[in-house]
Amino acid sequence: MGMVSEFKEFISRGNVVDLAVGVIIGGAFGKIVTSLVDEVVMPPIGLLLGGIDFSELKLVLKAAGEDTKTMPEVAIQYGAFINTLIQFLIVAFVIFLIVKGINTLRRKEAEAPAAPAAPTTTEALLTEIRDALKSKK
């Protein structure tokens, strides 16, 4: 089996395609959550806390020199970390809701009674014989 045909078989498997779709949708979802946190959630929180812009919060370890190219500022960007933490919590909550929904559907499918199996050909033949013997009496 050639390398190209092996590669085609590998790519055409359902789980590889599903994984690719999941990664693409996940990347787009990440951008939506980032926008939601940075542009919708954090401004009102900052306003409630006295006009604080969380993305600008930092602990300056060493101030920038007059020439910022040779002496850039050294700072711990804890405001950006807070934004990222909130983004993570939103994504984790949405994933939790999705998994919870899938588990609920699976439980409902498991609880649904299965239809009784059709009798095998042997059982059908035995039933016919029994019915024929009953009718001769």
Image (tube, rainbow, N blue to C red):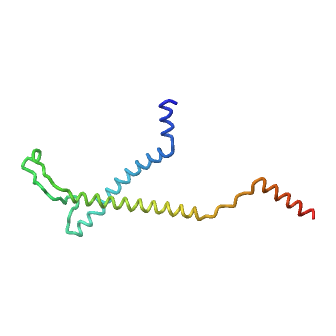
Q: Residue furthest left?
A: 66
Q: Residue at x 86, y 57 (%)?
A: 129
State how many labels appear: 0
> Which residue occupies the foreground of this view, 46 or 92?
92
Q: Residue at x 18, y 56 (%)?
A: 76
Q: Residue at x 45, y 47 (%)?
A: 19
Q: Residue furthest right?
A: 137
Q: Is residue 44 above or below residue 30?
A: below
The image quarter in which residue 81 lies: bottom left
- Residue 110: percent from left, percent from top: 58, 62
> Which residue occupies the foreground of this view, 124 or 95?
124
Q: Is residue 136 left or right of residue 84?
A: right
> Which residue occupies the foreground of this view, 63 or 128?
128
> Which residue occupies the foreground of this view, 34 or 131?
131
- Residue 56: percent from left, percent from top: 19, 58
The image quarter in which residue 57 lies: bottom left
- Residue 128: percent from left, percent from top: 84, 58
- Residue 43: percent from left, percent from top: 26, 63
Q: Quadrant of the C terminus?
A: bottom right
Q: Residue at x 63, y 64 (%)?
A: 113
Q: Is residue 92 left or right of residue 109?
A: left
Q: Is residue 4 above or below residue 11?
A: above
The image quarter in which residue 134 lies: bottom right
